[in-house]
Structure formats: structure tokens, C-alpha cells
Image: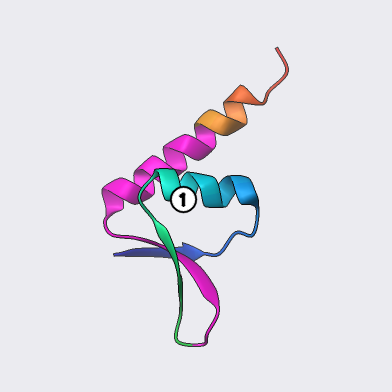
Amino acid sequence: MQTIQFDDRPEAQRRLSQAGGYIDFNKKGQPVFKFKNFKDYQEYLRLGVEAFQGGQAQ
């Protein structure tokens, strides 16, 4: 299980869902992004890079 800091941006939450991740809460009650496995986390990162590169002016 992979856990990373919560991101309140809608586009980040969309990528989270696309990659198979979900929003959960840590022991302090703070929201976090969670992934079942490292492969899903890597997909989330790949989608982020793809979105960043797609948004660059050409």
C-alpha cells in the first residue's frame, strides 16, 4: 500500500481515480491519497507527467 499527501486540486483527484487510487484518512484524521500497490502509484505519476507535458505551450 502506498500513501501520499492529499492534493485538493480536481485534476489530481481525477488522476488518482484513473490510476486506481482513493482518498482515505490517516490516524490524525487528515485526508491522504492511497494506492493498493506501487504499480497504481506509478500510473498516477505517469498521468501527472502526461498532463504537465500536454499543458506546455508548443
Q: Is 43 a magenta residue?
A: yes
Image coords of residue 1 (percent x, y): 28, 65
Is 18 drawn above or below residue 55 in the view shown? below
Q: Give the range drawn in magenta.
A: 28-49
Is 42 drawn above or below residue 1 in the view shown? above
Image coords of residue 55 (percent x, y): 66, 26
Image coords of residue 33 (percent x, y): 46, 63
State the residue position of label 1: 16
In this view, the residue in front, 40 or 10, is 10
Q: How crowded is mark 1: few (under 14 residues within 10 Å), some or many (20 or more)?
A: many
Query: Which residue is drawn at the image coordinates 68% and 23% (left, top)?
Result: 56
Which quadrant of the view contains residue 11? top right
Is 33 drawn above or below residue 40 in the view shown? below
Query: Which residue is drawn at the image coordinates 55% and 79% (left, top)?
Result: 30
Which colour scheme appears in the figure?
A: rainbow
Give the residue furthest to the top. Answer: 58
Q: In this view, does 25 lie to the left or right of 54?
A: left
Q: In this view, does 53 lie to the left or right of 42?
A: right
Query: Which residue is drawn at the image coordinates 43% and 36% (left, top)?
Result: 46
Q: Is residue 25 left or right of residue 39?
A: right
